[in-house]
Amino acid sequence: MSHSNIADRVRALPGWRHPAALALTLLFSVVVGLASITWVSGPATLSWWWPAAGVGAAAALMSSSAQRPYVSAGYGAMMVAVSVIGERGMGIAVLGGLSAAIEVYVVATIATGRSAAPGIRNLKAAGRFMLGAVVGGSVGGLGVAAGVAVEGGSFLSTVGGIAASHTSAILVITPLVLITREKRVTPWRISLGLTLLTLATTAVAFFPGWRDPLGFLPVPVLMYAAFTQSMRVTYAQLVLTIAVVSGLTALGGGAFANSAGSIRVVSLLQLYAITLAVTVLFVAAAQAHQRALIDQREGTRRLLNEGFARARSGFAILSEEAGGALVVLEINPMATTVLASELTATAKSGLVVRPDGTLRPFARTLVPGRSDTTAWPVDEGDDALLRVTIEALDRSDYGTFYLLYVEDLSALREAEAVMAARLEKQRQIVDALRAMNQQKDDFVASVSHELRTPLTSISGYAEELADLVRTPVERDYVAVILRNSERLLELVSNVLAAARRQRGDAEAPAVPVVLAEVIEQCLLDVRYSVVSRELTTEVDCASSVRVMAYASDLGRVITNLLTNAVKFSPRGGAVTITARATEDAVIVTVQDEGPGIDPAERERLFEPFYRAPRTIHDGVAGTGLGLAITRDLLAGMKATISLDNAPARGTIAEVRFPLAPAPAEVPVGAR
């Protein structure tokens, strides 16, 4: 597995540490630049090698994209100072410094591309870096050569050598910060042996006094190192080889020191260094990338194998060999346990399927691409605890394979049993609650029926007494009896209606009902309350208006609405009942002159047993069942009810009934 490189670690430094590291790198470029200048003598003499270019490119690569222009400009300014100190002339100093800034910026920009993290991690990244080194070195060569021309020197004879000098410096020095640290690929003894072998072949090729062109001798050893060792070790061997070649050439060894051609010895060394660096770095980068991919693939394979082994379900992959034998390629512990009786171990093929078992004949009947399921090893059916799915795959290049998937159904069966037991318990509870609810409804209905008869008798005799009494005290007594008997009758009627709706009892099919007749009858039912409160009633309902309804339910609805209107109207007020037919409905309204309804409480008034706080505070009698029962009764007749405040004062209860057919369309006997 690869780790971060020096450039990554410097870029990740927090706070002031990052710019401080960049500043130190630039100062180091000044040191190596001055060292390169002092290595030669004479105000117009140029250095034969310029390592400052490699250090400056490293600084640019260690900076972020936002910092890069400033770092490049800082490097260029320092190179101007180095040239001035080295007395190289203002032309070389200015143009060389400007080209140096552009040079390192170009190298860093091309080398990073679109990647945020610089590095030589694969072949593509190595190619970008080398392209950046060549382009940047060429820019540096052009700038310095232009400065030489300004100072009176030759541009053409200078540009090639300077470009090679800068390019080789970038290729040799800058990778120090770009190569990632890998785990040890080969033992250190082998690395040491390869290093010594590289030095030996280099010494043979460039031994002082030898003139034979044997510079290719170290190349095979470096290539082998690039293929077998980590990129960092290979690069160290490359740098060491170039250093030894340079030293031996300086001592007069090898073909470069004794060349009679037109290319200078220094230029030959730089081209040799460039060639070795490009070749070795390309191969090493490709191998490093391949090793990273292999490590990643191996890690993924280990994770898959671990998950394969730990899976609660069973998996197995079988391969059909010559002669029809089924060899186990992969199998996890659960599948091994389930198929233990079907498998046997052989010395030649390892784990194979027994030829005398039941699995092999079953698999041989499969058609490639089709999955078959069987219960194993118990009998098939809803009680099977295991299910084995077998699929045949025909791969023309490799043969026939079988995929086995074993499902453990024991947990599913246990869950099904628990669910069935819970459902049965819930069913018993529901049946018990339903029976208790039915008993309650029957009890309420029975008691209400028994109470209705004596209450009707009390109310009737009280009305008779009201006509016979003479004194005010007696009239008050009779009024109390009538008022409370009617309250009890209303309560009993509401309870009976609620019980009937809960049981779903239907009195008779809905029929066209003359609305005026029902309203008249309901007014008679509340006549005593109307008279005692000195109310006036107004009815606006044509005799031809009919609605589709249940007769008894319709009477209960109108009576409940009238009772509420009378109850909340002030003494001496008026109650108005209107009915009008539209194209598709009959609208009935009951309006009183009471205090009205708070809009926030309109819907809550239809909840069973809910009573408005102001009603309770004013001591208005009631149970909170009337409107709830009214809405239920109307729903059974496909009618709706709504409450609203009257424009002036009071409350309007509006009921919308479905329109009944015309009298001519009513079947004979429907009334």
Image (cartoon, helix red, strand yellow):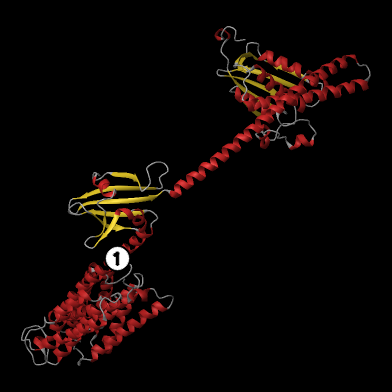
Q: Secondary structure at mark 1?
A: helix
Q: Nearer the viewer, residue 592 or 93?
A: 592
Could you tell me how many numbered marks the image carries?
A: 1
Residue at the spot of label 1? 298
Tell which of 537 and 143 is nearer to you: 537
Q: Quadrant of the C terminus?
A: top right
Q: Report the front residue among 399 and 530.
A: 399
- Determine which quarter of the picture holds residue 94: bottom left
Judged left or right of residue 197, residue 357 is right
Q: Is residue 52 left or right of residue 201?
A: right
Q: Is residue 75 visible?
A: yes
Q: Position of residue 624 (x, y in %)?
A: 72, 32
**Residue 520, quarter of picture:** top right
Tell me if residue 307 comes above or below residue 643 in the rendering.
Answer: below
Q: State the image coordinates of residue 424 (x, y, percent, origin top left).
A: 55, 39
Q: For mark 1, does the 10 Å Cα neighbourhood hold few (<14), some (14 to 19), or many (20 or more) residues?
A: few
Q: Residue furthest front?
A: 356
| Any part of residue 644 in sight | no
Q: Position of residue 505 (x, y in %)?
A: 63, 22
Vertically, is 419 above or below 23?
above
Asked where in the image residue 4 lies, by quadrant, the reply is: bottom left
- Rendering coords of residue 37 (x, y %): 23, 89
Q: Please say if 333 is above or below 247.
A: above
